[in-house]
Amino acid sequence: MGAHRKPSEFPELPVGDGRPLGNNYYDPDIAHPEVEYRDDLQVQCPPHTTQRKLVTKIDLRVIPVLSILYLLAFLDRTNIANAAVYGLQEDLGLTGTQYNTALTIFFVPYIVFEIPSNILLKRLKPHAWLSACMFLFGLVTVCQGLVQNWSGLLVTRFFLGLAETGMFPGSFYLIGMWYKRSEAQKRYSFFFGSTSLAGAFGGLLASAIGKMDRMRGYLGWRWIFILEGITTCVVAFFLYFMIPNFPEDAKWLNPDEKAYIRARLEKDQGKSALERRITPRDVLNVFKDFKIFLGGFMYFGLIVPAYGYAFFAPGIIKTYGYSQVGTQLHSVPPWAASFVFALVIASFSDLFKHRFVFTLICISMAIAGFAILLSTHTNTHLKYGALFLVTMGTYSALPVIVCWFNMNLGGHHRRAVGTAWQIGFGNIGGIIATYAFLMKDAPRYKRGYDICIGFACLSALSCCLYAVAVTWQNRRRDKAGPDLGLGESEKVEMGDRSPDYRYLL
């Protein structure tokens, strides 16, 4: 039966306009309503199932688990904003920019160890590495609720960044090794939507936990860290047994299903070279591609407004005249709206097999929101409505940008390094964001809104340059045709640099 053949034995059949492109196909039929589950790659599905059923099976095993993991990671990272509303700064005696510095120190190890973390993820298996990191950042979050001064807060924030460094790039890397490029965006957006859910749940939880103020001698802000950190540690134990590994190692798939998944991914993205370890030379080769740097700036530009909102939204909303509990509750709706809108954008992006235009639409919404906040000072309802534009635009564009860049990287080596680079470099923007909104600038925060608009424009410009680059390279490869002088193993090593590879716009 065809399903029992080795993946490499599947014929390279033409699709769409009939042009065979080696291991990767460029299908001009981008708007077919059934495109996601149409077997246009000419790979035979095992007889006991269908492609739709198998993809659904993968969805249920991969996406919810990783979404829970990142929801708790983002919650533990940003709950300091909720704690600040309940008196963290006053209790620890923070003055000037000490609070902002505590936010900044998180990003130092978080940025530096992104690439090493993805290399360890590949060597140690995702389920072991990610669950171990999760337990550690849960433990550090508990310790954060026990600190007595600014120095203790700095230490815990540093180790929190160290423990969380592998969560986001590792999860994105892992998701990218399970799905075709045409079906990835909805999954990425649902996963990334866990940040919006974390923001929404963070406000709800903080409004409830805050009522435990002075219980057993602890102030409400301490209970926020302690209870949410304990929850993370408990969940990490269960996720050790639930986090999926790469398709080649999945024990919940039978051999026929593994062969089919590997074959369909090879046809769509090229062979992955999972069996070979990543070397320093592999890392160096990735950075010889100028598009790698464009991908970093695409993400970097939007991280500034993203973290600017995540860390300071409760403080901004508090200036609208709400109580402590009212502030927490009013922080929930913008996050919830961004989650829904991100899924809508993702659905259309996958439907049309297109990313570029959707990044510009979302970034434009975010810029419009910040422009309203910058120019409106007395209309509280309008300012609160602008927060919806900010969250919906920023947190819908980010998963599209990361998916677009990540899924255009071919092979395990280039994707592991490239994804970690984009997230690591991009998170330098988090350092900028922590100093964008200073207490002395309240309640108008003109400097913060100016900074966010400027960096959102940088992201939009980088997206335009990246779109031009991939379009130009696709056309150049179409004109040149296949390179018959390259062997199959050489093309595998080249990944998306192979002359047979076509980028998704």
Image (cartoon, grey):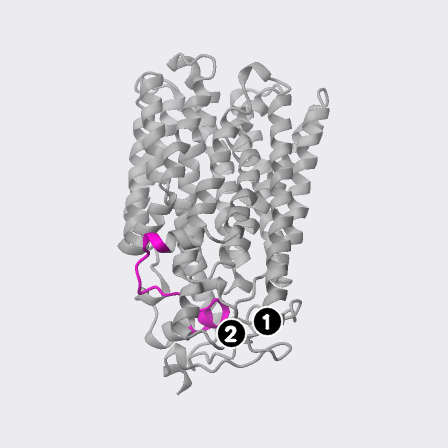
Which numbered marker is on residue 282? none
Residue 121 shown in magenta? no
Q: Are marks 2 and 1 in contact (CB under 8 Å)?
A: yes
Figure check: 15 above or below 435: below
Q: Quadrant of the N terminus?
A: bottom left
Position of residue 229 measured from the top left corner of the image (x, y, whole percent): 34, 34
Position of residue 234 measured from the top left corner of the image (x, y, whole percent): 29, 42
Can residue 147 be seen here?
yes
Figure check: 263 above or below 434: below
Position of residue 466 measured from the top left corner of the image (x, y, whole percent): 60, 51
Q: Quadrant of residue 6?
A: bottom left
Tell me the element at label 1. helix
Task: Name which residue type carries label 1.
Answer: Ala
Could you tell whether 97 is left or right of 333 in the image? left
Q: Quadrant of residue 476?
A: bottom right
Q: Label 2 vs label 1: CA separation?
A: 8 Å
Q: Determine which residue is flagged by label 2.
A: 483
Figure check: 163 above or below 415: above
Residue 264 shown in magenta? yes
Q: Determine which residue is flagged by label 1.
A: 480
Q: Residue at x 30, y 20 (%)?
A: 216
Q: Residues within 10 Å of mark 1 (few under 14, many from 20)?
A: few
Q: Residue at x 51, y 79 (%)?
A: 42
Position of residue 369 measured from the top left corner of the image (x, y, whole percent): 67, 34
Q: Quadrant of the C terminus?
A: bottom right
Task: Name which residue type carries label 2.
Answer: Asp
Can residue 172 be seen here?
no
Q: Residue at x 52, y 28 (%)?
A: 328
Q: Residue at x 31, y 53 (%)?
A: 127
| Magenta stretch bounds | 263-281
User: Who is closer to the viewer here, 368 or 220?
Assistant: 368
